[in-house]
Amino acid sequence: MVLDNLGSSLRGTLNDLRGKSRISEDDIDNVVKEIQRSLLQADVDTSLVMDLSDSIKTRALEEEPPSSTSARDWVLRVVYEEMVDLIGESTELPLEPQTIMLAGLYGSGKTTTAAKMAWWFSKKGLRPAVIQTDTDRPGAYDQSKQMAENAEVDFYGDPDENDPVTIAEEGLEATADADIRIVDTAGRDGLNQELIDQIERIDDAVNPDRNLLVIDAAMGQSAKEQAQEFEESIGIDGVAITKLDGTAKGGGALAAVNETDSSIAFLGTGETVQDIERFEPSGFISRLLG
Ligand code: GDP
């Protein structure tokens, strides 16, 4: 079946349906309650959980399951399909020349993700370059340069230049030989107008093919507001969730996906450049429900 590693109580509730050919409203209520518990614990936005619950209930009870599908398998299938509908398939990323800009708050993992993505594209046979425009965080240039070296990809930054837009423009010229340009931007402790103005100016100068929002898996409900702000200012085409090697399940990022009407592109699973995975729904859904 498409879902592995379900949490023991959800698995138990589903197993209670074994042998039944039809499900009752009580049966599906029990399953939905378990799912709600897991998702709320994983920081998924309450209104998303409620909408999902309604669609699971409606479909499981009102639609006719395919013949010879057991009640258990039918419920599991509806749960999976509705969750994929909520979370979306992986963000489309054609393996062709493009410029990708990363946005997000300070510490979300942008600089790390920029190098990781560059590494990922290089393994696909492309020639990536990282362009570091963060002039605010003192260590950003060195960290980014070092990680680009670890990833064995091109790098452009200028520790003596204070204007991120100039760095971005010069970076595009300096990396003309690269296929994939990944533009890292400065973050802040919180969203403020200065950050938004700056990233809008970089966005205008760079004109990226895609803007990805980088979100720490531990970020809870505030992911939603942040996503709205970035969506309004530069437009967000996909989300990268970082630090999934920790205990946080990344459910907060779903609100960002929903707000930006986008999808998840990458998952970060550690501190080295190789610790990146392309998002695929089933593993992530299992994790949320686990
Ligand atoms: P930025 O301020 O958004 O550029 O964030 P950084 O890329 O500097 O990351 C902040 C911290 O999080 C650093 O210590 C990174 O090593 C760490 N980090 C980033 N991504 C991951 C991840 O996927 N897993 C873990 N464990 N740490 C991460």
Image (cartoon, grey):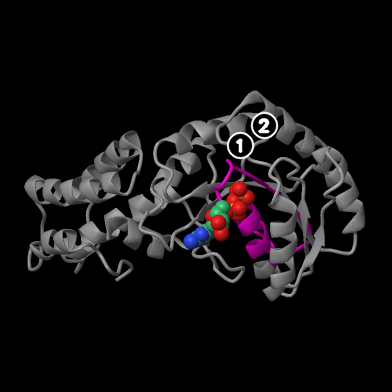
The part of the chain drawn in magenta is 91-118
Q: Is mark 2 within 8 Å of ligand 1?
A: no
Q: Which residue is mark 2?
A: 195
Tell me the residue at 61%/41% (across/down). 236
In the displayed structure, 35 sits above or below 12; it is above
Point out the frontmost of discs 2 and 1. 1
Give 101 or 34, whichever is nearer the viewer. Answer: 101
| Residue 124 on image: x %, y % | 69, 73
Q: Quadrant of residue 188?
A: top right
Q: Name the residue beneath numbered marker 1.
A: 188
Q: Is mark 1 within 8 Å of ligand 1?
A: no
Percent of width and height locating residue 273: 62, 68
Total residue callouts: 2
Kind of residue at badge 2: Leu
| Mark 2 closeness class: few <14, some 14–19, many ≥20 residues within 10 Å | some
* Mark number displayed over residue 16: none
For badge 1, the amino acid type reads: Arg
